[in-house]
Amino acid sequence: MSADVKIVIPARFGSSRLPGKPLLDIAGKPMIQHVYERALSIRGASGVVVATDDERVMAAVEAFGGKAAMTSSDHESGTDRIVEVSRHWPADIFVNVQGDEPLFHIEDVSRLIDAIVADESIDVATLYHAIDATEAGNPNSVKVATNALGDALYFSRSPIPYDRDGENIATYKKHIGIYAYRKRVLEHYSDLSQPMLERSEKLEQLRLLHEGYRIRAIEAIEAPAGVDTPECLERVRAIFRGEKPVAGPSLANIRLVITDVDGVLTTGQLAYGENGEALKMFNARDGLGTSILQNCGVQVAGLSGRDSKVLRKRLDDLHITLFQLGKKEKRQACQVLIEAAGVSPEETLFIGDDTLDLPAFEECALSACPADAADYIRKASSIVLTCKGGEGAFRELADIILKAQGNEDAVATARGYEQLAGNKAQ
């Protein structure tokens, strides 16, 4: 079976974190040129076009001999941009390749094309690769669950499947946003309404699943190295220079955990005693988590915008000697704690739940938040936990760190726990 396949590269000029992203220089060429030239090598494709909304991008593409199409600046997604291109550029199948992924894997896209061309019943094909449970907890990593044929059952920002009994039998698949669409899908895409699932998850592919379209998910080698932040850009530039990229932050390297109090170690609710003292309810499971972490070589520090006898008593009970209390400027407070602990920001994780914690998220290499944190906090966090604040969130985080550092026996077996030295305060 044969089909005419075209590659479309959506490339918006605007970007809140990297303005003019398609034209950023990488090894002497604009990024969009690297993507375009790589796309020319995709097996099974008969042509490549950049779909942009800016004359500067179009001029840059034409300058290196590429083909570009001007599209509306009103499109909400790359798919909408591809729909517009498909109306003027005939093909049976359109494949979108992200304009900010100059190192995408050519063979993965070729296999994607092979799959959809070979089976007429497949409406859309996309890619995924395996990830661990820690990354599965990140709402910025979209997960996909598939059936026995490899067709997508659901896409979610939450970990799917849910490991109900904690048996560690769940495996997770991270969705890679490269798609192959049949022409018939794009012809009707603009007429489809946004279902509740899409509005809730903010994932446009759920619109297609809701309408009954068949989406085949193909396993890829790994996620391509995309360019979303200045740090990403520098890593990609290093790869093009032939340098070994610096590894990103890892839970295996965490040596200090700084925790907020209200909303993390407590539910965030306040009760006042007769003398006006704020009373707080702490979770014993969280307390044991702090003790086990410290006994396994990970320091724990407390940080709170409040200061009270109750809070100081709790920290003392847990033998937490590193703390900054009554501190509203949390970035600066984190800097003080990191220096006092004798570690680097790359070895530090902060767990918080609200807007005041965002500067601390930026100061530390990794961040985490409880399940009941606001949506914008969840999106900013490296790890989103399944427990709520004051209901075991810190203990859950401790278990994740211990597992990443090969110390899971400290919590998973009686022998491992008994071998821990020091205090086991709760």
Image (cartoon, helix red, strand yellow):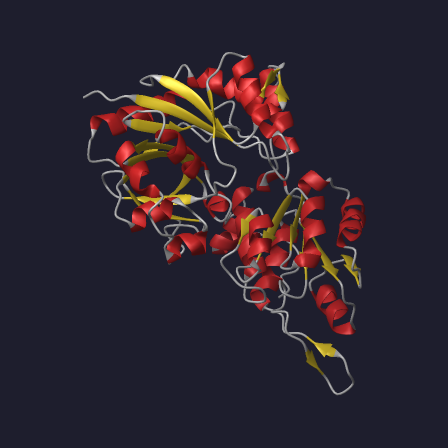
Q: In which quadrant of the rendered view does residue 221 lie?
A: top left
Asked if residue 85 lies left or right of residue 230, the reply is left
> In this orientation, which residue lies closer to the viewer: 332 or 142?
142
**Residue extending furthest toward the bottom:** 274
Residue 231: x and y in percent read 65, 32
**Residue extending furthest toward the top:** 65
One can see residue 177 in this view: yes
> In this orientation, which residue lies closer to the viewer: 339 or 97?
97
Can you say which quadrant of the picture contains the C terminus? bottom right
Residue 14: x and y in percent read 60, 35
Residue 104: x and y in percent read 46, 24
Can you say which quadrant of the picture contains the N terminus? top left
One can see residue 244 in this view: no
Q: Image height check: is 252 above or below 43? A: below
Residue drawn at x 23%, y 38% is: 149
Residue 350: x and y in percent read 66, 51
Q: In which quadrant of the rendered view does residue 237 lie?
A: top right
Residue drawn at x 71%, y 41% is: 345
Residue drawn at x 61%, y 31% is: 232
Q: Image height check: is 366 above or below 425? A: above
Q: Image height check: is 75 above or below 361? A: above
Asked if residue 396 lies left or right of residue 83, the reply is right
Q: How many dots with numbers?
A: 0
> In this orientation, which residue lies closer to the viewer: 29 or 129?
29
